[in-house]
Image (cartoon, rainbow, N blue to C red):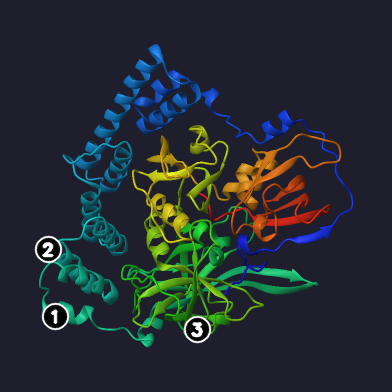
């Protein structure tokens, strides 16, 4: 397994370095200047006028609707402007309807589903042309007819989750799974079919069988990235990266980690890089492989080799594990192929990745395991090994299988997977998902979505989730959308009363969202998303801090550092280190609760915060 150069730790688990400091700092900023630095940097409204909206109504109606919301939030609308905005909005909605009808007529089912979601965000029901579940089901059948079994089965499951499959459809997909020799996929469609009718016995026998670890290891390979020779102390040393991968389709498609194959696709990498896979031991021949698609935010990649595997792992009949469940990890630790280790699920919902959480396991994994499958004792996919911490044995992590299933459709299309992005950082508090930061030059800042409000609904859905899982639940809603789709977001007060409704067009998610924001925003405001520290200005005086702590987000770095509300602070030494994705901010703190004491707190944070939407 490839461990990262620096230990992987959640931002909420980093403890700050406290250094005593015996010098006060002079605050020369006026209260007005401090308030301005804490005001959201609305920078785009002035660029748009009615003529811009008119220009987008025909070619890009979703963009026009987004701009109409911007215009109303910035300038209001009255008289002739109000009448024209209503007319432009009606034309844009009608153009969206027509685009969806054309997609249906041309059997572009994926586009039809996307346009249906945008119309649904506007509260428009289009039963006459079909619902999203209909389009996804039609896409699944089309893909299977074309021989694309991986994408076809994934689309069938999405359709089933929206609306349970009927008996005939379940039987169709069950037969296809048996033909493709994917037992666990067949088990999924068997369960769907049995809920609607009686399934032929011969299909039941195959689907109810069980694959052994000896079967599964036939579907796992070693990934070798040859990066030539590196020079260390005057000696040439082979520069190679070892990882694991597993087949998810009989055409030769495999899943591994992005960090294993990064040199193959990263434009910043300068040097030689060639990828091969190996099915047996070190004496086995190597098979050339290439990258199809990747999702850096989830540390996943889809690769392909011209090889027909003996065993294919199912990403359909996956399992959401419970703490204490037994799991197997399969891979090539240190290049030792076909190694199987056993352990348990130690914890869930560890917040490491930009999007969502990961699973903690104690099954033994080492360098070379990265990208290998984690399965339960029934052979169902649980996750994909992606990281461990060298100095702590038994502390290892896996990307959940449900995240892989959600990411695969975008990766199959090829290239870098694009994710939708609103531009909000949220914190789970007593009132729900509180918006603590709106990033500049994003859809959320375009619409002036207020900080301090709570997310009430997304696309008219009020999200309920157990404590600690609310933010991942919100991310799951956006995960299925495309950049460029319309999303309806309603904000609420602490009591849950809805306060405002916004129609936003999602933008592509930046590679490091908060790194982009740090270049455009003040360091005082960046304290909120990076460190969980919301500040308020105080009257500037000689030899006194410039801000008061208005809010400390529970579980944040600032919370673990011991900061509390009403603590006076000033900020200095803020810098962004994009190379490693780290930030370091030094804060001078006078702790009122412990008497007169000044401290410099060095708070490290990761720029790829997992609490962003």
Cα separation, mark 3 vs mark 1, equals 35 Å
Q: Relative to 232, say whether 453 is above or below.
A: above
Q: In which quarter of the image is residue 170?
A: bottom left
Q: Between tags 2 and 3, which lies in front?
A: 2
Numbered tag placed on residue 217 in the rendering: none
| Residue 112 in picture, x, y percent from top left | 27, 43
Q: How many labels does the image show?
A: 3
Residue in front for this viewpoint, 123 or 237: 123
Residue shown at 52% from the left, 53% from the top: 429
Residue in front for this viewpoint, 464 or 226: 464
| Residue 397 in picture, x, y percent from top left | 53, 72
Near mark 2 (Cα within 10 A), the count class, few <14, some 14-19 or many ≥20, is few
| Residue 223 in picture, x, y percent from top left | 51, 73
From the image, tell me which residue sits under label 1.
202
Cα separation, mark 1 vs mark 2, equals 16 Å
Looking at the image, tell me whether mark 2 or mark 3 is earlier in sequence order: 2
Q: In which quarter of the image is residue 55?
A: top left
| Residue 79 in picture, x, y percent from top left | 39, 12
Q: Left or right: 238 with respect to 475?
A: right
Q: What element carries label 3?
A: loop
From the image, tell me which residue sits under label 2.
168
Q: Left or right: 202 with respect to 518?
A: left
* Quadrant showing the N terminus: bottom right
Residue shown at 30% from the left, 25% from the top: 90
| Labelled pair 2, 3 in contact (Cβ < 8 Å) | no
Looking at the image, tell me whether mark 3 or mark 1 is earlier in sequence order: 1
Near mark 3 (Cα within 10 A), the count class, few <14, some 14-19 or many ≥20, is many
From the image, tell me which residue sits under label 3.
337
- Identity of the residue furthest to the top in this view: 80
Q: Relative to 285, say whether 548 is above or below.
A: above
Q: What element carries label 2?
A: helix
């Amino acid at each position: 397994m490839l461990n990262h150069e620096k230990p992987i730790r959640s931002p909420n688990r980093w403890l700050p370095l406290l250094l005593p400091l015996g010098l006060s700092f002079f605050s020369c900023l006026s209260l007005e200047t401090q308030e301005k630095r804490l005001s959201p940097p609305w920078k785009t409204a002035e660029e748009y006028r009615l003529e811009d909206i008119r220009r987008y109504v025909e070619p890009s109606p979703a963009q026009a609707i987004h701009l109409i919301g911007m215009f109303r939030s910035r300038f209001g609308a009255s008289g002739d402007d109000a009448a024209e905005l209503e007319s432009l909005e009606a034309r844009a909605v009608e153009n969206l309807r027509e685009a969806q009808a054309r997609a249906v007529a041309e059997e572009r089912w994926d586009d039809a589903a996307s346009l249906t979601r945008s119309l649904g965000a506007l509260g428009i029901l289009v039963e006459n042309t079909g619902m999203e579940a209909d389009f996804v089901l039609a896409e699944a059948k089309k893909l299977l007819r074309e021989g694309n079994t991986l994408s076809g089965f994934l689309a069938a499951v999405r359709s089933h989750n929206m609306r349970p499959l009927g008996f005939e459809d379940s039987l169709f997909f069950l037969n296809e799974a048996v033909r493709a020799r994917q037992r666990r996929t067949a088990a999924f469609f068997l369960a769907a079919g049995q809920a609607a009718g009686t399934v032929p016995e011969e299909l039941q026998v195959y689907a109810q069988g069980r694959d052994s670890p000896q079967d599964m290891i036939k579907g796992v390979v070693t990934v070798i990235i040859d990066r030539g020779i590196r020079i260390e102390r005057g000696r040439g040393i082979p520069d190679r990266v070892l990882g694991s991968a597993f087949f998810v389709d009989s055409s030769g498609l495999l899943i591994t980690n992005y960090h294993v194959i990064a040199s193959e696709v990263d434009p910043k990498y300068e040097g030689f890089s060639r990828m091969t896979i190996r099915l047996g031991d070190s004496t086995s021949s190597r098979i050339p492989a290439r990258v199809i698609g990747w999702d850096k935010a989830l540390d996943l990649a889809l690769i392909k080799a011209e090889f027909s595997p003996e065993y294919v792992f199912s990403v359909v009949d996956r399992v959401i594990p419970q703490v204490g469940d037994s799991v197997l990890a399969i891979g090539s630790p240190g290049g030792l192929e076909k190694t199987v280790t056993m352990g348990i699920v130690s914890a869930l919902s560890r917040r490491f990745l930009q999007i969502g959480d990961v699973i903690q396991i104690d099954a033994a994994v080492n360098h070379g395991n990265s990208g290998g499958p984690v399965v339960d004792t029934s052979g169902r996919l649980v996750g994909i090994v992606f990281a461990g911490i060298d100095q702590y044995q038994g502390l290892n992590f896996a990307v959940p299988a449900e995240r892989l299933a959600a990411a695969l459709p975008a990766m199959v299309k090829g290239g870098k997977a694009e994710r939708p992005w609103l531009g909000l950082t949220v914190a789970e508090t007593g009132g729900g998902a509180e918006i603590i930061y709106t990033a500049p030059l994003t859809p959320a800042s375009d619409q002036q979505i207020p900080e301090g409000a709570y997310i009430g609904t997304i696309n008219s859905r009020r999200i309920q989730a157990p404590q600690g899982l609310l933010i991942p639940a919100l991310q799951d809603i956006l995960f299925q959308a495309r950049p460029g789709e319309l999303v309806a977001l309603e904000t609420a007060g602490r009591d849950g009363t809805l306060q405002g409704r916004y129609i936003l067009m999602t933008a592509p998610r930046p590679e490091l969202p908060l790194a982009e924001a740090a270049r455009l925003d003040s360091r005082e405001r960046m304290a909120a998303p990076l460190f969980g520290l919301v500040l308020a200005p105080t009257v500037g005086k000689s030899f006194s801090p410039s801000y008061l702590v208005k809010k400390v987000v529970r579980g944040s770095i600032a919370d673990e550092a011991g900061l509390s509300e009403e603590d006076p602070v000033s900020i200095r030494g803020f810098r962004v280190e994009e190379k490693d994705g780290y930030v370091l901010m030094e804060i001078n703190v006078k702790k009122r609760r412990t008497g007169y004491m000044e401290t410099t707190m060095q708070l490290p944070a990761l720029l790829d915060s997992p609490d962003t939407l």
